[in-house]
Amino acid sequence: MADSLVPITPTGQDPPRRNEDLSAWLTARIDLVLRLGLLGILIVMAIYFAIQTLPSGGNLTSIRQSIFLSPGNLQDIGRQMAVAGVIALGETFVIITAGIDLSVGSLVGFAGVIAAQEFSGGWSTASVMASVLLMSLAIGLVNGFLIDAAKIPPFIVTLCMLGVLRGLCYLIGSGQQQTLASVGDPANFSAWIENSIFGIPNIFLVLVVLGVAAAVFLRFTKRGRYIYAVGSNRESARLSGINVRATILTVYAMSAVLAGVAGLLLLGRLTSANPNNGTSYELDAIAAAVLGGASLFGARGTIFGTFVGVVLVNTLSNGIDLMGLDAHLQQVVEGVLLVVIVWLDQWRKRRVSAG
């Protein structure tokens, strides 16, 4: 008699359970928030800063006169986000494998110090760029080897490398700021960094080109798919024939090389190298990648999401500066957003595992 009360589905399967349906619905909505929520926050933030920076006596009909939306300020935002954005691209590769690279900020400063000294020694721009990128590649391979072969956690390896590189910045540069020469190759290098094409800063175009290349690599190449597989389950990836060591070496090498590129861009923009350059840049890069949807648990993340995260972080910084607010407010807002996004990602991961 009791059996007759059990509903039968047309397919002959067990009827759906309400709790599982609710869990799946909530998980899908969390995914949607993680993917699109940041865009909404960015749009609201941009509108708010545009209104708040209207000239005295302005109204919403003259919003185009907003200081925030002025061409000069938008170009400044593009230049500001270029360095952090290039670092964040490399950090995204590492985070997708469930790793982390804390050494990129110090590598930015170290690359600048080395490049400044080489420019002072009469090296050509091509030679300086080649040497800095090769040096960065070697540092990234050392990080990757220690993490995979020596089985040292990425946090420890890259934290130690952070200290080593920052110390070398002071030792090699004698703790002094080095200013690039105002003539010759150094001057041409800095001028190219500061110039624009059709109103778009060259330094921002570098970020766009590298971002497109990174997105194509992740989405359309075999090695890109391997990166996601390693982040999902390293042992399963190994058993399926993926060369896990080569993949780990690849992501840390790419992160370091992109940090080296960022160091060159920062040197050209500031026209000087300081041992403190790049300090805390690793935190901004990690924040941008995670805010953009990359999961610290691995296997999730996109270049587009990271790009949006970089735009948000730099828009926040620029808006706070224009409004004359305490610059530390950016760290507060950024930290709150980061905690919320990571919490939502943890919640989603637990739901998926339970399902």
Image: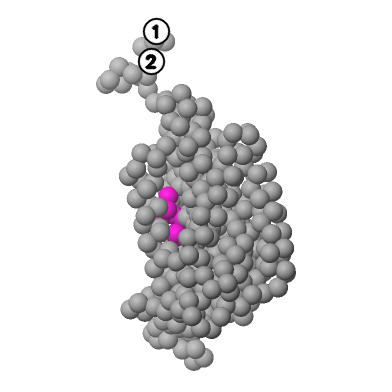
In front here: 45 or 96?
96
Mark 2 and mark 1 in contact (Cβ < 8 Å)? yes
Q: Could you tell me residue 317's position as x and y percent?
A: 56, 70
In front here: 99 or 18?
99
Tag shown at residue 274: none
In front here: 71 or 69?
71
Q: Which residue is mark 2?
A: 5
The reply to whether residue 71 is in sight is yes
Quadrant of res 267: bottom right
What is the magenta segment's predominant secondary structure?
Answer: helix
In front here: 16 or 81?
81
Span highlighted in magenta in the image: 302-309
Residue 172 sits above or below residue 294 on the image: below
Residue 142 sits above or below residue 180 on the image: above
Report helix, strand or loop for mark 2. Answer: helix
Tag shown at residue 1: 1
Residue found 36% across the figure and 39% down from its top: 222
Q: Amino acid at mark 1?
A: Met
Q: How many marks?
A: 2
